[in-house]
Every structure is written in structure tokens, then in C-alpha cells.
Amino acid sequence: MFDGSNDFVNFGDPADGHLDFGVGSFSISMYVYITSNLATYDMPISKGYSFPGSYNVGLGTGAWTGYVRNETDGIGVIFTASPITNQWVHLAYVCDRTGQKLNGFKNGIQVGTTSIS
């Protein structure tokens, strides 16, 4: 039941790899509404964080950040420096492999770019 406390959907790790973006470009987009932070890293979406090809969005008590991990490094783009509570916020990031950039958007406005080269 989605009652606003510790709710999640687990998609697992499909054998066909359709959640594995590999070396291609991809984007992740979501609306979030939080009334308070539960932990340092609240993650509305996560496909890991410590192995090549992992990605996530970290909310929580600090900066809200979108991450991807290549073969050696975790790379992030900041959506906002501090939490936003009690309002809907649209977050998106685009991992542009051709342009070698990770672009972050908050409420439709580009708020950050990080090199992924």
C-alpha cells in the first residue's frame, strides 16, 4: 500500500537487460513529492551505485543528485543544493554518451551539466 511511508516498487533485474543502459544514451524523469527526508540518501530510483552501468537519483538531507557510473567513477549532476519539501518537483537527467555530458533538469529548467568523458 502506498501510504507515504517506506513505499517502493521493486522491478528486479530483468534477465533481458531492458533496465541496463550500457554504453548508450538514456534519460530518467520523475515527479517527486516529499514531506520530510528519511535518510541521507533517499532514492526514488536506483539500479545500484557501485558497479559499472549503475545509476540512481539520490534525494535526502543534502543535495539532490542524479548519478551514473562508468567503468571507474561515479559521476553526478546536482538538481538542487538542498531538499524541497511539500511540493511536486519534476526531476530529469539525460546521460548523453555522444556529447559526453550528464545534464540535470529541475521543473523543466537545466540546472547542471557534468562531463562524463
Image (cartoon, rainbow, N blue to C red):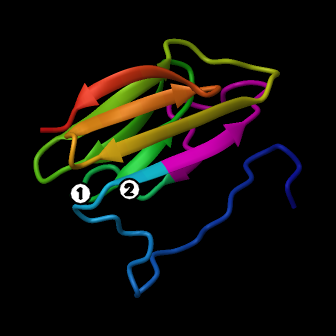
Is 21 left or right of 105, judged from the image as shown? left
**68 is higher (above) or lower (below) than 65:** below
User: Are the residues at dot 2 and dot 1 in contact (C-beta closer than 8 Å)?
Assistant: yes
The amino acid type found where label 1 is placed reads Phe
**Left or right: residue 6 compared with residue 78:** right
Q: Which segment did they paint magenta?
A: 28-45
Q: Quadrant of the C terminus?
A: top left
Local crowd size for mark 1, using a 10 Å CA cut-off: few (<14), some (14–19), many (≥20) = some
Crowd tier of the residue under label 2, counting other residues whose Cα lies within 10 Å: few below 14, some 14–19, many 20 or above? some
Q: Which residue is mark 2?
A: 48
Task: Identify the residue under disc 1.
Answer: 51
Asked whether 42 or 23 is in front, the reply is: 23
**Does 14 sit above or below residue 63?**
below
Asked which secondary structure carries label 1, the reply is loop
**Residue 38 is inside the magenta segment:** yes
In the rendered image, residue 50 lying in the magenta stretch gets the answer no
Q: Is residue 21 left or right of residue 36?
A: left
Query: What is the total number of numbered labels drawn onto the structure image?
Result: 2
Residue 14 is labelled as none
Q: In the rendering, at what x and y percent does residue 36 appear?
A: 74, 24
